Amino acid sequence: GINAEYGARTMRIKVAYRSEKLVIPISPLYKTERVEALLQLITERFKQHLGTTSETFRFVQLKTADNFLINPHDKICEVIEQGDTLSVVDYEDFIKDQYPLLSKRWLKIAQSDFNSSELVKWLDIGFHNLNKVYLLFGIGYDKTQKLLRLELFDKGALRDYAKPGKKLIGRSEGRSKNGDLWFIEAHLIIEGDRVIAIEGAVKSSSDFQANIQRIEIDSSRNLIEPGPITSVQKHYVTVKKSYSVTTPMFQGPTFDPKDILSPGESKIAPNPENYQGRDKCTGNSTLCMEQIDEVYADQSWKRDGKFDNIFYCEFYVQNTSDEPLSIVRVKSEYEAEDGWIQAQNTFIGSKSSYYNYNLRREMVYNWQIDKKSPQKIAVGSYFQIEGPQYDRMRRAYKTFPSPLNIRITLEDSNKQTKSLTVTYQNPKLSLCTSASRMKENSDKGTLVWWLECDDLNVGVRLYIEGFLSPDKTYISIADGSGRSTYIYRSTLRRWAWDATRENKTEYKMEVPSINVDGGNFTSEGYALVDLETSWVYGVKMRLKTTTSSAEKSFLIPDELVEVDD
């Protein structure tokens, strides 16, 4: 670099920066240096003079006394003489003037940072409107964006290098709060006496190594043009090592295959096709009841440890007498081994559509039934349940007998009653299997991970699935709730980086997790990490219900390919 020692042969130049003026001595070695090196010397001298230690304070342009710009890539001996008076342009003013002229980006290298306090690091290489190549160094995007450095090269600068090889033309660096190094740097690749390519390297504080890419440059034509882009080095290292996983663990009962709906079998419950007619009614009221629809089961959401199991049914109700008559009360009971058990609430109303009932939530009614004319009335029977609940299931809870007999009793305005008993039976369970999920989701790719766990109390099957995408760039993880997430190789590297810093061989994954009914139903996923190589080689999945639990580990498929960030 420039030797700033004073001596008999030292050349002196006068440099002005705003209202400040300095005489800068430089040694005779300047003949082998370029103006950009002189700018570094001038920057250091003014930093000392102004008493600033700012890393962003620097000069990037040098002008003659009559305001002619000196190319920073020219040799000093060719453009500056003893006693010249010069002025400098600082980085802030330079950016304001030149940034609007950056018109076309040819290459962007950007590296995100796993350190939460760190911003993305990036390097742009492209075309400047004045037929120059620009290199822009920066961190962050949008509101967090900070431009660190801008280098410009015209055709002359790209064709005027005496030494072939690789020349560093700019570097910005720093460290995260954890002390991890990040940097952005660029090199000119020189063959003969001209630049044939620009090589950019970007490393975030969490990268194993820099992402290095090279773009060829053609300055032989009127306009500088870009050539092919090649990858010199990835920011990650692929570990080639054999791994194995532990034996799966399953505890608790599973569903009997006879209780599960087989492929192609109807989901309709085997309720009676012949509904209960008026001849089955009992009681002394002149009201007459006739079942006209099957019984539908539903559940409310659990609250304060309880939920309602609701059974709906629609009837024709007719007044067979010649006198006006109204329904004033209604009750429901189900038949247990030791007698009839009354519902906590029973309401009447109308049915609008499938599973859509408009019930009047009243204890005493004055529902008039016209003489001789049958009227449609829907009845909802609410039985309170204390027990675990995973979801609102449209079926009878396990504690009910099967089939389930429900007796509906109407009390009329003459205080006489009429009852009719209807029957409900749960349909077979429609449960997911690995085969059914593969058939239903063939467009998702290949099923590579599958874990299931049954709950015989509430009639559900929890599962976690992993599909390797058709292009093999990610694995989509999903459970029965409809939530999903995507795992890329970059995701695995993030987990490995976090796990290594925390010294954990099992790292809790950021995937859909179930935590329902106070923890009675849970799912968890863990990345399996080799701390020696900082590599995620597999995942461990866990499921738990009120009756069972399951745990299984899976290797990361070798087919999962890398996608550049």
Image (spheres, rainbow, N blue to C red):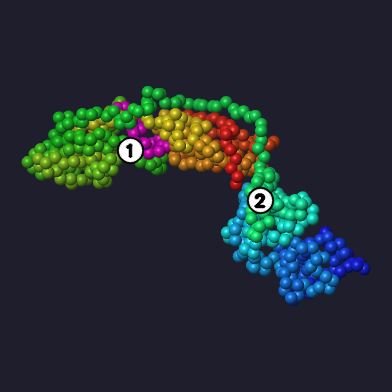
Badge 2 amino acid? Ile
Q: Which residue is mark 2?
A: 215
Q: Residue at x 16, y 41 (%)?
A: 375
Q: Which residue is mark 1?
A: 298
Q: Quadrant of residue 421?
A: top left
Residue 223 visible to the viewer: yes
Q: Position of residue 177 (x, y in %)?
A: 69, 52
Query: From which residue to which does the magenta span run?
Result: 382-404
In-front residue for pair 58/175? 58
Quick check: marks 2 and 1 in contact, CB under 8 Å?
no
Question: Please, is residue 412 above or below residue 117 in the view?
Answer: above
Badge 1 amino acid? Asp
Q: For numbered disc 2, what is the local secondary structure?
A: strand
Q: Earlier in the sequence, mark 2 or mark 1?
A: 2
How packed is label 2: few (under 14 Cα within 10 Å), some, or many (20 or more)? many
Residue 415 visible to the viewer: no
Q: Position of residue 282 (x, y in %)?
A: 17, 31
Question: Please, is residue 355 above or below residue 551 in the view?
Answer: below
How packed is label 1: few (under 14 Cα within 10 Å), some, or many (20 or more)? some
* Residue 528 part of the magenta segment: no
Q: CA separation, marks 2 and 1? A: 65 Å
Task: Indicate the quadrant containing the N terminus: top left, top right, bottom left or bottom right.
Answer: bottom right
Q: Residue at x 72, y 74 (%)?
A: 67
Q: Residue at x 54, y 34 (%)?
A: 541
Magenta span: predominant SS is: loop
Q: Position of residue 556 (x, y in %)?
A: 58, 34
Question: Please, is residue 389 above or below residue 74 in the view?
Answer: above
Residue extending furthest front?
A: 221
Q: For numbered disc 1, what is the local secondary structure?
A: strand
